[in-house]
């Protein structure tokens, strides 16, 4: 598989992930709005609200994985002189201080991910 094919496939995953996340977010917002208007016991409203909060947490976690994929794609493009403009990629997210985040990816981890994808 050529790098360009790999990048195209990863970009499809990124776009699908973004679209799905937006649809989930919109649905959760609707449920939250309906929940605030329901005439049900407070403990049930709080249970629904806690579930919605869990969904937001999962969405944030999923977004971190999407950002990691974007970083890999950007890294592959840069290292192989591939024109990123044809893939409509966002610039990779940067952590202000990588030591403060367990979600950051080192250059070595990026290279290992790329090697794993090639096998």
Image: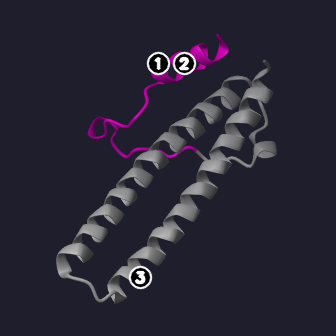
- The reply to whether callout 2 and callout 3 are in contact (CB within 8 Å) is no
108 is within the stretch colored magenta:
yes
The answer to the question of whether label 2 and label 1 lie on touching residues, with beta carbons closer than 8 A, is yes
What is the C-alpha distance between the residues marked 2 and 3? 44 Å
Task: Give the label on residue 108, or none.
Answer: 1
* Residue 97 pos. (x, y %): 33, 42
User: Which mark is in front, 1 or 3?
Assistant: 3
SS at circle 2: helix
The residue under the point 48% across, 40% down is 65
Q: Which is nearer the eye, 107 or 1?
A: 1
Which residue position is annotated with label 2? 111
**Residue nearer the viewer, 38 or 11:** 38
Residue 6 is inside the magenta segment: no
Q: Please identify the quadrant where the N terminus is shown.
A: top right
Badge 1 marks a residue whose secondary structure is: helix
Going 50% across and 46% down the picture, which residue do you hit? 93
Quadrant in the picture for the C terminus: top right
Q: Position of residue 98 (x, y in %)?
A: 35, 37
Say if 119 sits above or below 104 in the image: above
Asked where in the image residue 34 lies, by quadrant, the reply is bottom left
Q: Is residue 90 at least partly visible in the picture?
A: no
In the rendered structure, find residue 33 and report the number of the disc placed on it: 3
Separation (CA) of disc 2 from disc 1: 5 Å
Residue extent of the magenta highlight = 92-119
């Amino acid at each position: 598989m050529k790098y360009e094919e790999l990048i195209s496939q990863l970009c499809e995953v990124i776009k699908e992930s973004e679209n799905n996340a937006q649809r989930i977010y919109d649905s959760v917002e609707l449920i939250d709005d309906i929940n605030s208007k329901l005439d049900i016991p407070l403990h049930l409203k709080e249970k629904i609200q806690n579930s919605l909060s869990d969904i937001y947490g999962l969405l944030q976690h999923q977004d971190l994985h999407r950002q990691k994929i974007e970083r890999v794609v950007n890294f592959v493009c840069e290292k192989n002189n591939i024109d990123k403009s044809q893939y409509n990629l966002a610039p990779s997210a940067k952590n202000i201080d990588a030591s403060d985040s367990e979600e950051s990816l080192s250059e070595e981890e990026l290279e290992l991910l790329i090697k794993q994808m090639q096998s």
